[in-house]
Amino acid sequence: MISYICTNCGAEVKTDPAEATARCPYCGELSEIRLETPGIDAFNYLYGKSFDKDTGADIEDGLKQAAEWLEGLGFSGQITGLNKAINLSGAQIDDSDTFRLGRFTDLEELNLSDTGVTDKGLPALLALTRLRKFNLNGTVVGDAGMGFMSGFGCLEELNLENTNVSEKGIITLIPHPSLKTLTVDQHKIKMITIIKAGGSRLFQMEHTLKLAKNSLIDEDLGHLKDFPDIINLVLEDNLIQGEGLSHLVGLKKLRSIHLSRNRLTDESLSFLEPFRNIGYLYIGGMKLSESAVKKLKKTLRKVRILSY
């Protein structure tokens, strides 16, 4: 039984959580019922009418306790029943709390960004078999935790920004059958390692691809053909000599290329001539003559060429 408030007289009414109406023992009116607290409301909205009574009272009590715990955190206003989502971004929780979240087995979206959750807290969440979106941004989750991700069979989107996950951990996610989008710190990770391992499909929603300081050579640029929708390409501080730039000509949505501090020469600037429709081209920090750059600017009249 769960406590409700009679909308007619305001008295507390105990009734079955699956019922939409209840007869008040005080005023006798058959009234619509509302839940006593926002936390319990979230519990009922997510589980009320679809709750399987055969699972027993212990499960029901556990869910109620979990909902009350959420209310106590002050985050009940961010519980969205319609989308079956819970946002606990910035909440003061850690691994000892994840077993409570595991009670919400119908959850589809969970945001634990900037919390104290680590790899050790993830196994308790494997009960969330319907989870589609998982945000771990700003946690100290690392490579060890990535081994649990295969247990989330419906997972489609995963945010691992500002975590301790390295290329090694990300590569273990590539075979995940349902995972479509992965968000990581591209400036901290050697993206080319992940791309070469077959991870291009996980970054198709990105508009900017950051491959600075990835030790790229011209041959590596052939792997970038897998990103037809990329708009900004950051290739600074690599070992590119120029010939490999021909692999990028087919990227029709490309608007900026950052090539500063590579190994381009006056002669290899000719490989940039096909890029007449981009907006910005960065070619600073290389031994290029003023005359060669001037010639390139004349060819790429509509492109803003910057030498820094």
Image: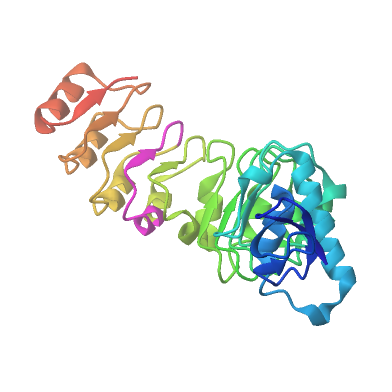
Q: Position of residue 113 (x, y in %)?
A: 66, 42
Q: Residue furthest front?
A: 27
Q: Position of residue 224 (x, y in %)?
A: 38, 53
- Name the quadrant of the N terminus: bottom right
Picture layout, residue 282 above or below residue 247: above
Q: Give the number of callouts.
A: 0
Q: Position of residue 221 (x, y in %)?
A: 38, 50
Picture quadrant of residue 261: top left
Picture layout, residue 151 above or below residue 297: below
Q: Position of residue 35 (x, y in %)?
A: 70, 55
Residue at image position (47%, 53%) is 203
Residue at image position (52%, 47%) is 191
Picture quadrant of residue 134: bottom right
The magenta stretch spans residue 245: no
Residue at image position (59%, 37%) is 188
Picture layout, residue 121 above or below residue 303: below
Give the camera-side residue of 134 and 166: 134
Picture quadrant of residue 169: bottom right
- Name the quadrant of the C terminus: top left
Residue at image position (73%, 60%) is 27
Picture layout, residue 163 above or below residue 41: above
Q: How is the image coloured?
A: rainbow
Residue 123 visible in this rendered orientation of the protein: no
115 lies left or right of 170: right
**Which residues are the magenta region?**
223-238
283 lies left or right of 74: left
